[in-house]
Every structure is written in structure tokens, then in C-alpha cells.
Amino acid sequence: MPSDLEQQSSELVVQAARLVRAIRRRVGHPAGIRILALLDDLGPLGVTAIAEADRSSQPTISGAVRQLVDEGLVGKEPDPSDARRSVVELTPKGRQRLTDARRDNGKAVAERLARTGHTADDVAQAVSVLRDVMDEQL
């Protein structure tokens, strides 16, 4: 039988995923935002590494990266360790787009939170717990 911590942890994952889906529907960011966020979290990566991190196919990510390059949100440079490959990194415009998307997400969540009666301190505690969990290797 699962422990209370396991049950609550499962519920945390379920509710976090529901929140992300709800905010994506509400805010409507393009799929490329996920790639920008991965590059922000992990630093410059090759297309294959982005695909692995996103659990997407390499052709799907290649197409998305091409679009992001065309929009000036990421740059592609030759990989210094292997000239046959390239490394994708955020541009200042891409970093700003990601900042804007995160701000929009925050506004959308704040609107929902305002209707619940939870305080900024409650949210800070939840963020602290999630940050501690994410600082651990999963």
C-alpha cells in the first residue's frame, strides 16, 4: 500500500500536469516555447539532444528548430567538437520571448489563484517544495 507521501506526491504530479495543460490552453504558446525552455534549462544543445530531452522525434525537432532560427529566436552554430553537427542556443530575442511567455503563464496562474483564497505565502511554499524536488536528480 502506498505511503501518504507517495499518494500526495502522485497527486502533486497529476495536479501540476493539469495546471500546465490548462495554462497552455489559456495562453496558447506555440510549441517552440518548450524548446526555448529546454535551452534555457540545459544550455546550448544539438538537435538530437533537444529531441531526447523533449521526448520528441529528431525530424520534429529539426523542423521546429528551423522555424525558431527563421524567427530569430535561436541560433545554430557548428559544434566545435564535431563540424558535422550543430549546436542550438537561445538568442536575446528568444530569451525575451521565453521571459514574456513565462510572465503570461504567471498572470494566468495568478488569475486562477486569486479566486481560491490562497496567499502569496502559500504559493511561495509550493514553489519552494517543487524547487527542492527539481533540484534532486529524477
Image: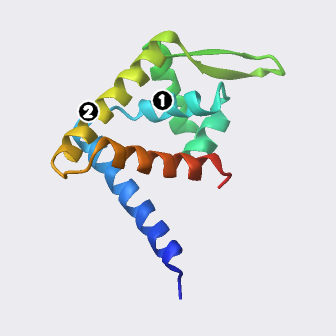
Residue 11 is situated, as x and y percent measured from the top left of the image, at 41, 67
Q: Residue 63: tell me if it is visible.
A: no
Image point (54%, 45%), residue name: 131
**Amino acid type indicated by mark 1:** Ala
Label 1 and label 2: CA atoms lie apart by 26 Å
Q: Residue furthest right?
A: 81
At horizontal 55% and vertical 34% (from top left) the residue drawn is: 38
Which sits in the foreground, 27 or 62? 27
Q: Picture quarter containing residue 85?
A: top right
Q: Amino acid at mark 2?
A: Lys
Q: Horizontal and vertical percent for residue 81?
A: 84, 21
Residue 5 in view, yes or no = yes
Q: Looking at this view, name the residue that lies furthest to the left.
A: 115
The answer to whether 46 appears left or right of 70 in the picture is: right
| Numbered label attached to residue 107 | 2
Q: Which residue is mark 1?
A: 64
Query: Which image quadrant for residue 26?
Result: top left
